[in-house]
Image (cartoon, rainbow, N blue to C red):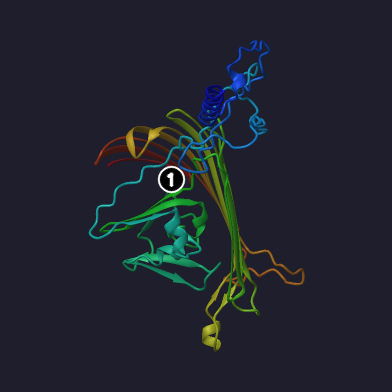
Amino acid sequence: MILRDVRALLLLGLGALAGAVLPACASAQAPVARDTVAGRRDTVPSRVDTAGGRRNLPPAGRDTVRIPLPARADSMIRNDSIIQGVTPAPFVLPPDTIKAPLARAESPPLLEIGPPRIYDRAALFATGAFSLSDMLGRVPGLTSFATGVAGAPTVVASQGDLRRIRLYLDGLELDPMDPRGRGIAPVNDIPLSSLEDVRIERGADEVRVYARSWRVDRTVPFTRADVFTGDQNTNLYRAYFGRRYSHGEALQVAAEQYNAQPNNALPSSDGRQFMGRVGITRGPWSADAFAQRTERSRGRFVGQGGPDATRDTLPGGEMKRTTSYIRFGNGDAERGRWIQATASAHDYHLAARTANSSFTSLPSAADSANAAVDSSLFESQYLLTGGLTRGPVRASLAERVRVGRGLVSHVMSGR
């Protein structure tokens, strides 16, 4: 009995020791039938949050899936080639805003000591002058004589001689047509607003002024308006417009008006100037028609002071001058081969000034200073020029024909 009790106690101690080392229950050792029902597995892969720290750890807690929504289509894109079924719009080249320039007259190089006197359009307006005569009076070597500012008679002299000035506009020489001027160049009949550049060539015997009219070469409209006012009741208004069109057409208009009254006891002086141009270019060929009209209505100027000063009187009058031409050209006078043909007409009309008041009587014929003067002059000028320009080397020929006052003259020149 003792041995049996000892054996039982030994078995119980070994069983307790095995249960302490192996926590599984003793029933686990018994054979059990296999579970054939498969459990639901999570097959959705989860993203690893890499923004929280350096280590890539799986997200804690419940697994969630975030799906980004597609961006909405841009309402500004009308024809997106990415969208299926939409044909992209064809690429259209924007039109060129710069057109071939119209023909310009030859401008000879200035060979003289010191800087040449060349004024472009910006420099002409920067001088502050109202007219070409006002600007020439500021050039060294030239002297201007004027009885006032706007509307006053003005003459320009070189070396003390009033007839040593020759004026050219687009290659056409503007001859003196005023019978009162006695051969003085018409420097008062060209407004600065209608000029593109001015070159002054000073020679040993005379001074030549080469002026070229204003041109445009862009389809963008170019406009400007100026208003000036000053003392002596002086007011000036001017405006101009220029534009080129898609097929090479050109349109330019300009207008200017001024008035002045230095003495309230005397009538005022006023003037109007108009300019217009139409043209077209086709490759190297160009054709344009130009017209410019100047109207000056000058009041009577009387000296100030005693009887001797008031005796010096300048009679008033109305002057109208019109310069127009038609020009055909090929090439540019500043480079390569070129040729131009120009036909122009020049008209001048001088008459006594019409009184503004109906109570003013007309001047009597006995008064030579106030006698009514009515004269009209007309002249035609034809110019054929051509030449070649290769770098610094230039060569040109010109044939000028004048028809007017019962005379026909031919002048051929080369340079």
**Residue at far right of view:** 358
Q: Position of residue 219 (x, y in %)?
A: 55, 39
Residue at figure coordinates x 64%, y 12% from the top left:
32
Q: Position of residue 414 (x, y in %)?
A: 28, 40
Relative vertical location of residue 282 with respect to residue 373 in this rendering, above or below? above
User: Which residue corresponds to mark 1?
Assistant: 170
Give whichever of 123, 105 is nearer the camera.
123
Residue 164 in view in this figure: yes
- Quadrant where the N terminus lies? top right
- Quadrant where the C terminus lies? top left
Number of disc labels: 1
Relative vertical location of residue 179 with respect to residue 398 in this rendering, above or below? below
Q: Picture quarter containing residue 259?
A: bottom right
Q: 282 left or right of 415?
A: right
Q: Position of residue 199 (x, y in %)?
A: 36, 53
Give whichever of 84, 386 is nearer the camera.
84
Residue 185 in view in this figure: no
Residue at figure coordinates x 41%, y 69% from the top left:
144
Q: 132 left or right of 49?
A: left
Q: 104 left or right of 377?
A: left
Q: Picture quarter containing residue 92?
A: top right
**Residue at far front of view:** 1
Q: Position of residue 142 (x, y in %)?
A: 35, 66
Per the image, label 1 sits on a secondary structure element best described as loop
Crowd band around label 1 with a 10 angstrom C-alpha radius: few (<14), some (14–19), many (20+): some
